[in-house]
Image: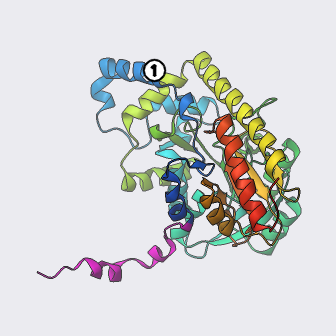
Amino acid sequence: MENLEASFEDRFAARTQRIQASTIREILKLTTQPGFISFAGGLPAADLFPIDRIGEATQRILREQGAQALQYSTTEGYLPLREWIASRVPGATPENVQIVSGSQQGLDLIGKVLIDPGSRVLVEAPTYLGALSAFNPYEPEYVSVSMDDEGLELGALEAALKARPVKFMYVLPTFQNPSGRLMGLERRRALVELARKYQTPILEDDAYAELYFDGKPLPTLYALDHALGGGNVIYLSTTSKTLAPGLRVAWVVGPRPLIQKITFAKQGADLHSPTLNQMLVYELVRDGAWYGAQIDRIRQTYQTRCHWMLEALQQYMPEDIGWIVPRGGMFFWLTAPAGLDSLELLKRAVEEKTAFVPGQPFFADGSGKNTLRLSYSSASREQIEEGLQRLGRAIHRMLGRAPV
């Protein structure tokens, strides 16, 4: 009989043209080779996963609430967990909270609910690559706004909002992925006020807020907007960076009409996030003393690894390579001379058996060819030292210089 498999290509929806394999991912498949040192994946440190605590809590849940944990549940999510989340978000109630299967699903559902073909979506330059991947199938028109050391440049932002309305702006104010930038308090206030002035909702992605190294966390954009009356910020966060990403427990907090639509959209996607995982996360976080100690352990470890990477960058990078020194989070963001293409540099780095993520895919407008992202969260001191030495050799070769 005739094999009709190839004919499916003619049946794909037009939107699938916007869903493409990543060139970077294809190159990074090579990083599975023995001896490879990769700074590419934004992976939480597996050695910090609370495996024993998770095992004990799982057994307790199955012993005491096993039938509930393994049964279908409500789309909105496990109520005690939603109550805990609402207690941490100013002005929120459980009805403002939707549990999602990782922040990535939250981004997809928000895109599905808010974006029409041609909708203008304002993003930072650079912005989180996963958000672009989630939004792309819904065919938005991106408006990229430049950043300085504190995040979105307000003058450029207001000029963009004046020019034409946008459906919403997507912002990562705290230890931004990929750049690691931290938006200061006054900038946050000004951003929230500007968004309200132009009646432009903000989608605040707050995945890294707990990972600060020094000082105290800054108020979220959601909290600042609530102080002005609320209703203009959608808040997205997760336990992937503080517990374990494999649990896929995250949440969206927002105005009730929006949350209701997201709930309906999620019903069509997966009915609900895994009940056992939600109950497990609640069992872990409701012990505030233990959860606080867990976050402190992650902060201290990441701060140490960040310091190791800073020392290696200072030793092995050419003088005309610049970077942002993180105050938290998981990433260094490097800027090379304008003529250096980081995608080509990746190929040379792979030859040296090391890898990073080129910066261009983080720019919705296709710029940023001379930028790159390095993650220190999962690397040992020896890996950071050796890997940065290898990367330094690759950069010097590409610039036609002798390595230090």
Question: Could you say which is closer to the camera, residue 95 or residue 137?
Answer: 137
On the image, the x and y values in percent for residue 14 come to 44, 79
Q: What residue is at 52 percent from the left and 52 percent from the top?
A: 104
**The quarter of the displayed image where residue 225 is located:** top right
Decide: is 386 above or below 159: above
On the image, the x and y values in percent for residue 289 come to 61, 16
Question: Could you say which is closer to the camera, residue 196 or residue 244?
Answer: 244
Secondary structure beneath label 1: helix
Way the structure is coloured: rainbow
In the image, taking residue 17 as reference, residue 380 lies left or right, namely right
Q: Is residue 172 visible?
A: no
Q: What residue is at 47 percent from the left and 25 percent from the top?
A: 51
Asked whether 18 falls inside the magenta stretch, the response is yes
In the image, taking residue 50 as reference, residue 229 lies left or right, namely right
On the image, the x and y values in percent for residue 97 come to 54, 40
**The quarter of the displayed image where residue 386 is located:** top right
Q: Is residue 161 visible?
A: yes
Q: Residue furthest front?
A: 402
Magenta-tinted stretch: 1-23
Q: What residue is at 57 percent from the left and 28 percent from the top?
A: 48
Asked whether 86 falls inside the magenta stretch, the response is no
Q: What residue is at 57 percent from the left and 43 percent from the top?
A: 43
- Can you say which quadrant of the picture contains the N terminus? bottom left
Mark 1 — residue? 52
Question: Could you say which is closer to the camera, residue 385 or residue 59?
Answer: 385
In the image, taking residue 16 as reference, residue 356 lies left or right, namely right
Decide: is 107 above or below 211: below
The crowd level at tag 1 (other Cα within 10 Å; few <14, some 14-19, many 20+) is few
**Identity, as a three-letter code, of the amino acid under mark 1:** Asp
Q: How many marks?
A: 1
**The quarter of the displayed image where residue 294 is located:** top right
On the image, the x and y values in percent for residue 365 come to 70, 72
